[in-house]
Image (tube, rainbow, N blue to C red):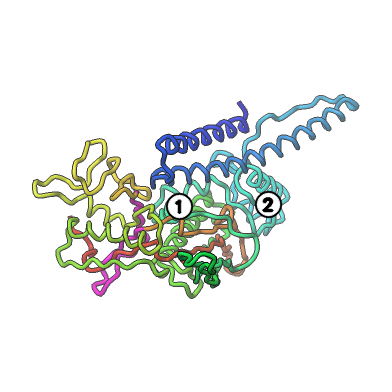
Amino acid sequence: MSFLDKVIERRDAVKAEMDAVLEAVAKENRTDLTAEETEKVEALVAESRTLDDKIEKLTAQAAADKKAEEARKSVASVATPSVTTVTREARTYTSESGNSFIMDAYNAQFKSDYSAQERLARHQREEEIERRDVGTSAFAGLVIPQYLVDLAAPLARAGRPYADFGTTKHTLPQAGMTLNISRGTTGSSAAAQDPQNNGVSETDMDDTLLTIDVITVAGQQDVSRQAIERGSGIDAFVVADLIRAWQTKLDSLLITGGGSSGEPTGLRSAGGNAVTFTSTAPTVALLYPKLADSIQKIQTNAFVNPTHWLMHPRRLAFFLAAVDGQNRPLVVPAAGGPMNAVGTGTGVAGYGNSGYQMLGLPIITDANIGTTYGTGTNQDEIYCITAGENHLWEQPGSPFALRYDATGAGSLTIKTVVYGYAAYTAGRYPKANSIISGTGLTAPTF
C-alpha cells in the first residue's frame, strides 16, 4: 500500500468516526452535541482538512511523477540506455541521514557550497509536498526539518498546552500585520405586532471593528564558528532549544499578553467574567461552587457553553490531593466507579490534556499560567474557557524560519535566529471565558 493509499484510508476512517457521532445524535433525536462530542467532531474536522490537503498535494505530485516517467520512457526508447528507477528515497534531513541542517545552512550562505545549496533546495521541496504549505526557497525562509521540531517535545519547557488544546486554530494570511473582525454592538429587534397591519419592530444594526495585531515571536543564539565547523549535534542543541523557547513564549503570551509592547491581548486581559475566590483556608469544597459560577456566567453573558478548564499543574494537584471526612479522594479515576466525586479522570494526570474533568469539562494543565498574582505574589488563576471563541492564527510551519547573520565576524561568531508570526484574540465574545482568582488560590501545600 502506497503512502497516498494510507492517507486516503485514514481519511475514510475519520469520516466514518464523524458519521458515527452524528448518527448517534440523530438517533437520540438531539439537536445539540455534548461538549465531548463537539470537541471530538472539531478534532475530526481539523484532521480531515489536513488529510484533504495532503491528498491533494500527493495526488498532484503523483500526476507530475507519472508525466516525468512517461517522458523518461519516451527518451529511453530512442537512446536505449540502461535506466535505474528510484522507487523510494529517504528525506534529506533526518537523525540518521548524516546531513547536518545547520552545517548546510552555514556552508550555503558563507561558503557558497553548491552541494549544501542543493540539499537545502531539495529539503524545501520535500517540506512543501509532504509537511507544510510553504513554498519559499529563499535562505531566510528555511523550513526547520521535522525531526528537529520533534526533538523539542520531551525537553524541559512548559510548551504550548493552551495553544494546542484551548484555542480554535486558523492559518495566518500571507500578508499584512493586522486582522480585522466586525463585532456587532447593536442588534436587530423583535416584538409582538400590535395591532395587525401596524409596523413591526425595527432597530438598525451597528458594529465596531475588532483589530487584531500580528505579533512576531523570535529568539536568537550566538554560536562560535568553531562549533558550526567542527562540532557535532549542533542542530539538536541550538535549533531545538530555540524552537522550545518560541513555542513556550507564544503560549505564555496567549494567556498573559497585555495588548501592548508587541504582545497580544491575552486571555487574562480580554475582559472575561471575573469570579473571586476569597479564603484564608482554601479547600476544594469552598472552591467548587466558584467553578459552577464560572460556567453559569459564560452561559448567562455569552450564551455559549464552555469547553475546558485551564489551570496550573499545581492547581490540578490541589484537587487530586483533596479528601473527604473519611479520607477518601474527591477526584478519582472514572474506571473506579466513583460516586459523588468532584471530578474524574483516567488515572495519572498528564501534562496538557490531563485526562481529568470537572463538571463535565476537560482540564488542560499549563505551567505558563502565572503563580505570582495577588498582593502576596503567590496566587495562580483558573480559567473556564470556550475554545471556539479563543482564536489563534499561525503561519504554516511556524517557527519555520532560520537565518544566519554574520554580526560577529571579528570574533568568529555566527548568529542563529528562529522566528514566526501569529495573531490571537479572545475578544469576539470576551464573556465566553471566566477567570477565577483570589486569596483562595495561593500555593497549595501537600
Name the foreground residue: 200 vs 409: 200
Q: Secondary structure at mark 2?
A: loop
Tell me the chief SS of the magenta region: loop
CA separation in Å, label 1 and label 2:
25 Å
User: Up-down: is 5 above or below 125?
Assistant: above
Residue, disc 2? 135
Residue at the extreme right: 78
Q: Residue drawn at (38%, 58%), measured in percent from left and top?
A: 385
Specify few, some or many for label 2: CA neighbours under 10 Å numbering under 14, 14-19, or 20 or more. Answer: some
Name the foreground residue: 420 vs 220: 420
The answer to whether one can see residue 383 in this image is yes
Q: Earlier in the sequence, mark 1 or mark 2?
A: 2
Residue at the extreme front: 196
Residue at the extreme left: 326
Residue interval drawn in magenta: 362-384
The spot of residue 49 in percent (x, y) is 57, 44
Residue, disc 1? 164
The spot of residue 160 in percent (x, y) is 43, 55
The spot of residue 323 in percent (x, y) is 15, 49
367 drawn magenta: yes
> Which image quarter: residue 224?
bottom right
The answer to whether one can see residue 417 in this image is no
Name the foreground residue: 267 vs 110: 267
Q: Residue drawn at (61%, 32%), measured in percent from left and top?
A: 3
